Each structure stands twice: as C-alpha cells, then as structure tokens.
Amino acid sequence: MASFSAEPGRLLKIVTDTLDGAKAEDVAVIDLEGKTSIGDYMVVASGRSQRHVGAVADHLIKALKVGGYGRARVEGLPQGDWVLIDAGEVIVHLFRPEVREFYNLEKMWSADRPMERMVV
C-alpha cells in the first residue's frame, strides 16, 4: 500500500480529476496546512441526489485504489446524504446540496485561525 503522506499533490489530483469526471458539482479545495494535522487538503463537493452522491463516491473509491492509495476509510455511503472519504492527506466530503448548505464546512475550515496571544 502506498504511503498517503508521500505525495499529497498527486493524491489531490486523482481526487479532483475523478470528481470532475463523475460530474460532481461545486468542487471546493481547502488547504488545511497549518490549520490541523488531520490532512493537507479537504475537498468538498456536491452531487445532485443521493444516488449521484453514492455514484461519485464509488468512482472515487475505485480511483484511489487504482491509483495505489489502498482502501480509503468511508462513512455515510449507504445513506448518500453526506459521504466522508478519508484518503489520508486528502479528506473528501460529498453532499447533497441542501445538506452541504446546512453544515457549511467551507466557511468553518476556510476561516483563518485567530492570532494567538503571546505570553511574555
């Protein structure tokens, strides 16, 4: 199994190319560097329906495996409202549009961290 942290740029390209090919909508890439240790990038995208979200997730899971990234951890696939695919350095959230709007992950994760006070 390939190391997830070895090539986050290559992994991100596989993710974004696959989402584009599967007709995912409103794809947003959020750079997480310096914000958290959970990964380098978060990708948020929408599907038109539960069925479309599931199909996009299936395509992505297969593309990650073919790309040498092993088996990604997946949650929410049976419901199809919000599917989380943890591919190591890239974390993907696939939503139905109304669920995405409700949780608004882009706003939460795109915000800059407030300056921490220096203790002298």
Image (cartoon, rainbow, N blue to C red):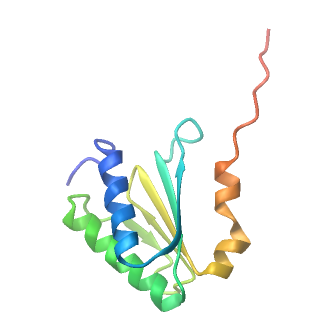
- The residue at 70%/54% (across/down) is 108
Residue 4 visible in this rendered orientation of the protein: no
For the N terminus, the image quarter is bottom left
Residue 90: image location, x then y, percent: 42, 54
The residue positioned farthest toward the top in the image shown: 120
Q: Residue at x 46, y 58 (%)?
A: 91
**Lateral position of residue 32 relative to residue 112, left or right:** left
Residue 15 visible? The answer is yes
Residue pictured at 32% horizontal, 54% vertical:
11
- Nearest the eye: 84 or 109: 109
Q: Where is residue 89? Give x, y as percent.
A: 40, 49
Quarter the C terminus occupies: top right
Question: Does 60 sit left or right of 114 as displayed?
Answer: left
Which residue sits at x=24%, y=66%?
Answer: 65
**Up-down relation of residue 115 to residue 83 (above or below):** above
Q: Position of residue 95 (x, y in %)?
A: 56, 76
**Quadrant housing residue 99:** bottom right
Q: Nearer the viewer, residue 65 or 45?
A: 45
State whether residue 31 is above or below residue 16. above
